[in-house]
């Protein structure tokens, strides 16, 4: 029976439209994956020596101390990105397969999910280094197994709290509070939690406890799922009471307003798009890492430009990235309705521009960190508006992953959460301004660098008509392929 | 109004549609019947430029559909759920389509007024998004939305499927009224021979992508069709 399930899974992966891309893209994606693997590996290897050098104490104890935050972040990440194993269950309900088998398979599938495996890249090399450095093997192994179990606990906790936004936000708020109070030295939660992780090392047999917890969580997740495996239960779509909204104030923009109204509703009423916008909002604070001089490596003007792009471009990257895909479920309507491609693209462009301007205004507080920080933000905004807004639209023409807005959750098992393609398309959007800045900086000075980037962005405005013409043609060329790809859900 | 020239669509070696010549005059109510895979939806998708023809082209009111977008203002269609925007309420959807077709709220409201029977109190003011309506009710919304803005060409793919008997009968009346107007060309496909013979003045039978019958509807048409499909 499991053989069948695995066969189905295999087919759904390799037969998905997003997988059938050009070969060079696949190679780039493989290189990207390799890169991230190497980064993680070197982090695992390097972390030990880095902590040792920084004089915080015994690296293992330091890691244990912050482990609670590591696990908390892991949980948050999972909640936002990891998909639930409920999809593809429906057709199984009618078949002569025991429910428990279906549930076992769905849960089992999450065990080999990226969200669990990724941690191995850090913990395995870290543990190996511990052994190399002469830590007692038995204790290291106990610790390693214990942590592994805790990561799997997260996996199953996430499955159970899924869809319970209230629980999630309360927990997230608690951890942010804990982090803040630790930073300001009011209260240090790690004092209470690090002994727990130390136990795993000091008394290796205690690793059994988290493993027992995993087993318990597995069975409760199992019971939870089995109980809810009905069409009107856990498999049902949640219905919310709908309210008709007019948003008449947008009418003054004419045809553009029509689309903007629609996009606002799209963002408000669909979980997937809401998450994207919230993520975009948090990008505003990303700059704090760079402008507060708290991290030495980041304390140079090149990184400031990088931050400027991200601070003002959060929406552009998180939402703009997927531009036609947001409309994927009704793309045939858009293509046959009385809509000109140009108008459609222009409205998306305006949406990105408006969001960038709002982000820039919200990011005004960076003035506090000096003129250079603020200049980087402003210049980043100009570049985003002038150049990156085109680049996302352009890239969007090739993004052929349909987005399922109506699904309750970013249904687990489909590879949209991490789209390496869109990540790769991000590179020219970020690297180019840094290069332009570097040229100005090295030839004349930092002010010239900022001016160069800004000038480049302004140049983008001048060519708006031509660029739009080009993008429009690409969209037209890709139209049929896109329609075909969106048909696959 | 609509002319297809040496139109064909192939997927690999398989020909799914091959029409040498087809002409649909203005104001005609045109019915398309055929078994699954006969090429009905393919033909409609080609008409809406949702897929590319392998050879030939379609001219809609003087506009070649795969070259220019100028056919969009006077053509409307409802093919399947992908013509609905799931996160809108029916009202919002109607207004959205209305705005795209240059109709304000009052115009749309006036039009909807005429379909209150058809909606049977299950569409407007339901506090539901389109994605939460039943398949049949979704279909009603899509069909009525395709009437907004006085289109000259209306394309409906399987409009009767999924509808309850009462609604089917009402829909027949609506399509007949629409077809009675001189300037509106209606294209309907259906698996239901009775409905389609009742509603359309001309019926074309597709089989494996080829036109095998082109009938001007008369009292004998239903028998003729039944004989064809039954035999």
Image (spheres, rainbow, N blue to C red):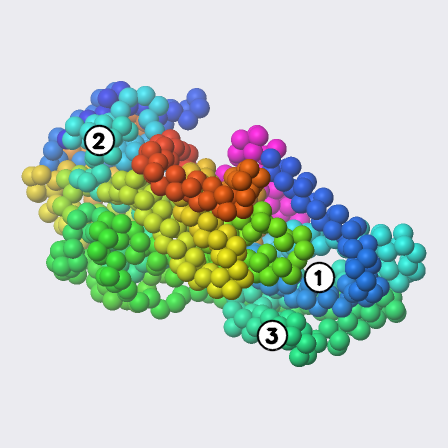
Q: CA distance from mark 3 to mark 2?
A: 70 Å
Which residue range is magenta in the image?
A: A1-27
Tell me the quarter of the picture where residue B27 sits.
Answer: top left
Which chain does tag 1 point to? A
Residue A90 % position (x, y)? 51, 55
Instruction: Estimate the spatial distance between the alpha carbons at disc 1 and disc 2, rounded to whole Å.
Output: 63 Å
Find out whether residue A4 is within the magenta segment.
yes
**A300 relative to A166, above or below:** above
Q: Helix, strand or loop at disc 3? A: helix
Mark 3 touching mark 2, by CB under 8 A? no
* Picture residue at 57% right of the left edge, 72% below the top: A173
Q: Which residue is found at the position 17% from the left and 49% from the top?
A: B102
Q: CA distance from mark 3 to mark 1?
A: 22 Å
Q: Nearer the viewer, residue B16 or B213?
A: B16
Between marks 1 and 2 in the image, the one whose residue lies nearer the viewer: 1
Q: Secondary structure at mark 1?
A: helix
- The x, y position of residue A202, in whole percent, is 88, 69
User: Same chain, marks 3 and 2?
Assistant: no
Q: Nearer the viewer, residue A407 or A252?
A: A252
Q: Chain of mark 2?
A: B
Identify residue for label 3.
A177
Residue bearing mark 2: B204
The crowd level at tag 3 (other Cα within 10 Å; few <14, some 14-19, many 20+) is few
> Could you say which is closer to the camera, residue B176 or residue B193?
B176
For this view, does A123 lie left or right of residue A410?
A: right
Q: Nearer the viewer, residue A122 or A219?
A: A122
Tag 1 residue: A151
């Amino acid at each position: 029976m499991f053989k069948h399930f695995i066969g189905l899974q295999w087919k759904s992966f390799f037969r998905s439209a997003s997988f059938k891309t050009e070969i060079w893209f696949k190679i780039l994606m493989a290189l990207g994956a390799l890169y991230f693997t190497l980064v993680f590996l070197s982090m695992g290897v390097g972390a030990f020596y880095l902590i040792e050098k920084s004089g915080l104490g015994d690296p293992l104890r330091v890691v244990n101390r912050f482990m609670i935050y590591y696990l908390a972040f892991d949980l948050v990440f999972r909640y936002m990105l990891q998909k639930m194993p409920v999809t593809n269950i429906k057709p199984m309900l009618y078949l002569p397969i025991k429910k428990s088998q279906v549930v076992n398979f769905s849960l089992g599938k999450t065990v080999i999910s990226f969200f669990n495996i990724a941690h191995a890249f850090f913990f395995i090399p870290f543990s190996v280094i511990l052994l190399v450095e002469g830590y007692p093997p038995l204790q290291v192994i106990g610790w390693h197994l214990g942590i592994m179990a805790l990561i799997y606990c997260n996996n199953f906790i996430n499955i159970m709290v899924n869809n319970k936004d209230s629980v999630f936000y309360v927990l997230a708020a608690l951890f942010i509070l804990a982090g803040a109070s630790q930073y300001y030295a009011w209260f240090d939660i790690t004092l209470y939690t690090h002994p727990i992780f130390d136990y795993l090392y000091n008394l290796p047999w205690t690793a059994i406890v988290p493993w027992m917890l995993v087993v318990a969580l597995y069975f409760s997740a199992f019971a939870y799922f089995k109980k809810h495996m009905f069409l009107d239960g856990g498999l049902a779509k949640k219905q919310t009471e709908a309210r008709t909204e007019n948003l008449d104030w947008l009418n003054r923009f004419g045809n553009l307003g029509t689309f903007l109204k629609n996009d606002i509703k799209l963002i408000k009423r669909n979980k997937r798009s809401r998450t994207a916008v919230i993520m975009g909002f948090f990008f505003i604070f990303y700059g704090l890492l760079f402008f507060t001089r708290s991290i030495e490596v980041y304390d140079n003007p090149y990184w400031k430009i990088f931050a400027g792009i991200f601070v003002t471009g959060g929406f552009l990257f998180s939402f703009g990235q997927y531009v036609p895909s947001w409309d994927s479920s009704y793309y045939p309507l858009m293509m046959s309705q009385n809509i000109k491609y140009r108008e459609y693209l222009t409205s998306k462009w305006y949406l990105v521009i408006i969001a960038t301007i709002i982000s820039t205004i919200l990011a005004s507080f960076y003035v506090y960190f000096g003129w250079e920080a603020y200049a980087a933000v402003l210049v980043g905004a100009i570049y985003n508006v002038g150049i990156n807004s085109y680049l996302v639209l352009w890239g969007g023409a090739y993004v052929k992953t349909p987005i399922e807005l109506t699904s309750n959750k970013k249904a687990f098992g489909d590879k949209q959460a991490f789209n390496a393609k869109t990540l790769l398309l991000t590179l020219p959007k970020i690297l180019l301004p840094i290069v332009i800045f570097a040229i100005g900086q090295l030839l004349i000075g930092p002010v010239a660098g900022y001016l160069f980037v800004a000038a480049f962005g302004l140049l983008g405005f001048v060519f708006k008509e031509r660029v739009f013409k080009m993008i429009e043609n690409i969209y037209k060329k890709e139209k049929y392929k896109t329609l075909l790809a969106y048909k696959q859900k | 109004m609509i002319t297809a020239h040496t139109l064909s669509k192939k997927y690999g070696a398989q020909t799914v549609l091959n029409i040498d010549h087809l002409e649909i005059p203005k104001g005609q109510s045109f019915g398309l019947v055929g078994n699954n895979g006969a090429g009905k939806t393919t033909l409609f998708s080609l008409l809406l430029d949702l897929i590319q023809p392998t050879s030939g082209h379609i001219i809609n009111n003087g506009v070649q559909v795969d070259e220019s977008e100028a056919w969009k203002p006077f053509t409307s269609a409802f093919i399947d759920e992908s013509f609905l925007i799931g996160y809108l309420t029916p009202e919002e959807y109607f207004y959205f389509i209305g705005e795209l077709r240059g109709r304000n709220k009052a115009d749309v409201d006036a039009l909807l007024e005429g379909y209150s029977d058809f909606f049977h109190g299950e569409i407007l003011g339901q506090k539901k998004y389109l994605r939460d309506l039943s398949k049949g009710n979704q279909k009603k919304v899509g069909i009525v939305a395709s009437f907004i803005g006085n289109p000259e060409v209306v394309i409906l793919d399987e409009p009767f499927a999924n509808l309850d008997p009462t609604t089917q009968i009402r829909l027949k009346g609506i399509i007949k009224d629409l077809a009675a107007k001189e300037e509106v060309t209606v294209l309907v496909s259906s698996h239901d021979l009775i409905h389609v013979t009742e509603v359309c003045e001309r019926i074309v039978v597709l089989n494996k992508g080829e036109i095998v019958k082109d009938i001007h509807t008369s009292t004998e048409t239903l028998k003729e069709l039944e004989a064809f499909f039954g035999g």
